[in-house]
Image (tube, rainbow, N blue to C red):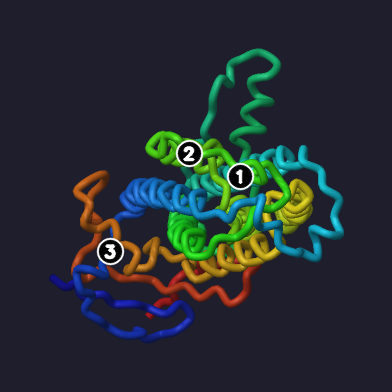
């Protein structure tokens, strides 16, 4: 089955071209993508849980193999308690990303003329204040991306980027076994209940499971870098620079906490940061969601969601919007008259 798609270039007077789109390239509904990519991410976390079992079992004996020489670890004093600081910053960065996504969602509703979201507005004294804080609309006037469906597209980029790098990390930690850093893994625990450890990996995204030996590359850095780049990319909808400054302060502090607590080697952080951000950038912001190749991974699923877009007709017009500058003031210009 193919569909006939005509694309118009904004700013031009002629069609870009006409093409027949095979069924496997037709985009799934965005809501379907979000729900199914959540399931796919959970499957990748389970796969990582199995990989952690292998990495933990294959880790060199700390009594025989000392930690690798590391320039930064030799320069930074060890502070074991800073491992908790890493977790705090992970929470702060993730919370920032969620707030940015929610505020952009409210902005899209506002621009579409939909009624404002309210909750407990009738509570005396604090009701109106809480509603302004939680549901107030922020608009910097800048449009780094088209505003249409920006929240589900943002979620899809998070889920797909994280899942791809999660699978890659699983293979990497099984491939080469690094000696433990100077932390609690110098006295490693034996995983007596492998299935339970995999379940704990799934429920806590790895933090609550026994996981020594999974050094190259850092799982903490993955989520820190992904939350950072999402907030960096989408926050200009709300304010030109405030959120960017906030996350730019948090990220290097989190890396310092990882190194000072001896949770990872320097290279573990550098590789994870590069791989995560590069993968995210490859999975671009697109009106159709994830790349069609990634949608093939979830197209076979019978549930949740539908496999077809109700308004996807044979003669649907797809508008291609050009956004040459990240902070352009209008990323969704109107079509010129013919």
Tell me the residue that label 3 is attached to.
Answer: 296
Q: Give x and y (percent) for residue 132.
A: 65, 32
Callout 1 secondary element: helix
Mark 2 or 3, which is nearer the eye?
A: 2
Towards the viewer: 34 or 168: 168
Towards the viewer: 169 or 113: 169
Tell me the residue that label 1 is attached to.
Answer: 94
Cα–Cα span, label 1 and label 2: 30 Å
Give the numbered dot on residue 52. none
Q: Do the numbered discs 1 and 3 sit on residues whose CB atoms are within 8 Å? A: no
Q: Is residue 141 visible?
A: no
The answer to whether 317 appears left or right of 302 in the picture is right
Name the residue rendered at 60%, 42% in the picture. 188
Towards the viewer: 267 or 311: 267
Name the residue rendered at 45%, 35% in the picture. 192
Give the mark nearest the N terminus, 1 or 3: 1
Tell me the residue that label 2 is attached to.
Answer: 191
| Residue 318 location, quadrant | bottom left
Name the residue rendered at 25%, 56% in the picture. 309
The answer to whether 141 appears left or right of 40 in the picture is right
């Amino acid at each position: 089955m193919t569909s006939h798609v005509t694309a118009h270039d904004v700013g031009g007077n002629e069609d870009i071209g006409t093409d027949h789109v095979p069924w496997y390239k037709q985009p799934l509904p965005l809501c379907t993508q979000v729900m199914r990519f959540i399931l796919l991410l959970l499957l990748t976390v389970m796969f990582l849980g199995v990989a952690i079992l292998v990495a933990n079992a294959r880790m060199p004996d700390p009594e025989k193999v000392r930690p690798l020489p590391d320039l930064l670890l030799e320069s930074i004093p060890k502070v074991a308690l800073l491992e908790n600081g890493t977790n705090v910053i992970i929470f702060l960065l993730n919370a920032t990303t969620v707030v940015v996504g929610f505020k952009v969602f409210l902005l899209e509703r506002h621009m579409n003329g939909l009624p404002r979201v309210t909750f407990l507005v009738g509570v005396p004294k604090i009701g109106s204040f809480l509603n302004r804080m939680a549901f107030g609309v922020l608009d910097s006037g800048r449009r780094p991306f088209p505003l249409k469906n920006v929240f589900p597209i943002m979620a899809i980029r998070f889920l797909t980027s994280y899942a791809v790098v999660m699978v890659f990390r699983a293979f990497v930690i099984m491939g080469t076994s690094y000696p433990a850093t100077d932390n609690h893994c110098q006295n490693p625990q034996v995983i007596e209940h492998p299935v339970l450890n995999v379940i704990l990996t799934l429920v806590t995204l790895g933090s609550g499971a026994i996981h020594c030996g999974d050094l190259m590359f850092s799982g903490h850095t993955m989520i820190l870098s992904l939350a950072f780049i999402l907030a960096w990319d989408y926050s200009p909808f709300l304010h030109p620079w405030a959120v960017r400054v906030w996350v730019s302060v948090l990220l290097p502090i989190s890396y310092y906490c990882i190194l000072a607590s001896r949770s990872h080697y320097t290279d573990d952080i550098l590789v994870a940061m590069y791989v995560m951000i590069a993968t995210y950038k490859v999975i671009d912001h697109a009106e159709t969601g994830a790349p069609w190749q990634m949608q093939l991974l979830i197209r076979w699923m019978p549930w949740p969601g539908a496999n077809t877009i109700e308004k996807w007709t044979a003669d649907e017009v797809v508008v291609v919007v050009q956004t040459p500058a990240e902070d352009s003031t209008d990323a969704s210009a109107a079509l010129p008259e013919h």
